Amino acid sequence: MDCQTHAHLPGRGQGFTLVELLVVITIIGMLMALLLPAVQAAREAGRRATCTNNEKQIAAAMLIFESGRQCFPGYKNKVGPNVTSWVVPLLPHLQRKEIYDLWATTAVGVEHKKLLKILMCPSDPPDTTGAGDTWLSYVCNAGKNAATASNKAAEGVCMDQVVQASTNPVPVLVSLDYISSHDGASTTLLLAESRLDAVSRGGVANSIWTTAAATQVGFNWAGTIAKVTDRIISRHGGGAVVAFCDGHVSFLADSISCSTAAPVFQHLMTPWGAAAGLGTTVLDEGSY
């Protein structure tokens, strides 16, 4: 190749101009802006699927317990020398019998308290994970008024099971047969998510499964309640994952009615709405 031919070859070593670089960066930024919401949505879908699976397993444990005892566990129960929540009686059915055995034989201590992944929604991670923290993302149907424990079978599912001569001499046992023979197990709530703030918990930082306080381990339908999120709430947005007494799990929109004229949420919580004072209106599945 002679020098003349070489002189006509294109120049070598030329890079991108500043304008070209800016265009490329702008395009990449636009693509990232379009892609990130989709990635976030996919991650949340995965977290919600895990949450749904958690509740399904817990509901299955509830039904196994009911099959053996002919009643659902209460939001408050006596296990060995301890008074605790609905979670502890279910531990043998959640493959954590070794923890249950501690509760059944010794007074509660730090060794009784463990973080259990099945009790935590991935979208609702623990505030802290120190020794003795027992985070709880799920709550049980504690009836009409969890704070005062009205404790009538028609009003809820998981009633106070601790005998107290003055306030609870005869604990109310709510069975699957009772629910099925009235409003139906497929339309009666058993579990729901709860993401309460510290004020709602009375200043307590975490919802915990080792307590027997109805306001922390249960949800209710009485009192001032203008919307579902006054009682149950999740981090998923738009509603909460719930389980029904027949074991099926669904997503309950936070827009369902809680009004006196159309108490859909209250009907969903009561095994027998008519006997609970909600009238004889038949629940419309299209309402939730």
Image: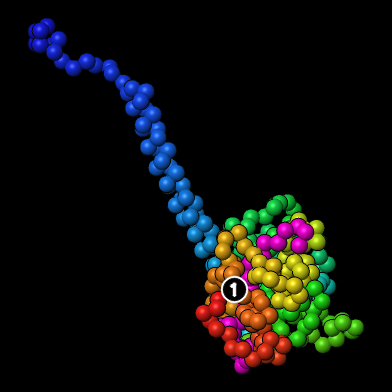
39 lies above or below 111: above
| Residue at x 71% of width, y 87% of height | 276
Residue farthest right in this picture: 166
Is 187 a magenta residue?
yes
Question: In the rendered image, which quarter is residue 233 located in?
Answer: bottom right
Which structural element holds mark 1?
A: loop
Total marks drawn? 1
129 displayed left or right of 36:
right
**Colour scheme employed for the rendering of this structure:** rainbow
Q: Amino acid at mark 1?
A: Ile
| Residue at x 49% of width, y 59% of height | 45
Q: Which residues are magenta?
A: 177-200
| Residue at x 64% of width, y 91% of height | 280
Residue ID for mark 1: 256
| Residue at x 47% of width, y 50% of height | 37
The one of 205 and 155 positioned closer to us in this rendering: 155
The one of 101 and 30 positioned closer to us in this rendering: 30
Q: Badge 1: few (under 14), some or many (20 or more) residues near its Cα, within 10 Å?
A: some
Q: Can residue 51 be seen?
A: no
The one of 115 and 9 positioned closer to us in this rendering: 9
Residue farthest front in this picture: 261
x%, y% of residue 288?
55, 76
Quarter occupied by the N terminus: top left
x%, y% of residue 14?
28, 18
